[in-house]
Image: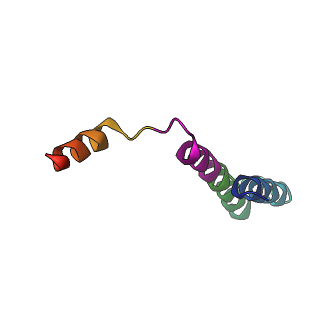
Amino acid sequence: MTFEERLAEEARKFKEAAEQQPPGSRARELLLRRARQAETASHINEWLTSPGLQPPKALENWLSDQKK
């Protein structure tokens, strides 16, 4: 399994576990938070590994200033 597939599987498991908890319970909210974190990590990984990734302009400017 790829990293993204593992993250998707983890998010799915957390969501399924959350469904077993009573609505509004602390356990349910924590499980849903973990699912969102896994989904966010997947999106960040997609962005970081995309071929068109560009550094933020501020970082780009800072790096060019450092080369002078």
- Which residue is at the front of the view, 58 or 36? 58
Location of residue 43 (image quadrant): top right
Q: Image check: 38 left or right of 54?
A: right
Location of residue 31 (image quadrant): bottom right
Which quarter shows the N terminus?
A: bottom right
Q: Measured from the top left, where is residue 10 in percent x and y?
A: 76, 59
Q: Residue at x 59, y 50 (%)?
A: 45
Q: Measured from the top left, where is residue 49 in percent x and y?
A: 57, 47
Which quarter shows the C terminus?
A: top left
Q: Measured from the top left, where is residue 7 in percent x and y?
A: 71, 56
* Magenta segment main secondary structure: helix
Q: Measured from the top left, where is residue 25 in percent x and y?
A: 72, 59
> What segment carries the magenta color?
40-53
Count all numbered tags in the image, as a single digit. 0
- Assess whether residue 7 is covered by the magenta stretch: no
Q: Residue at x 74, y 57 (%)?
A: 2
Tell me if residue 19 comes above or below residue 26 in the rendering.
Answer: above
Q: Image check: 12 left or right of 30?
A: right
- Assess whether residue 49 is covered by the magenta stretch: yes
- Residue at the limit of the structure toward the bottom, as seen here: 27
Q: Image check: 56 left or right of 20?
A: left
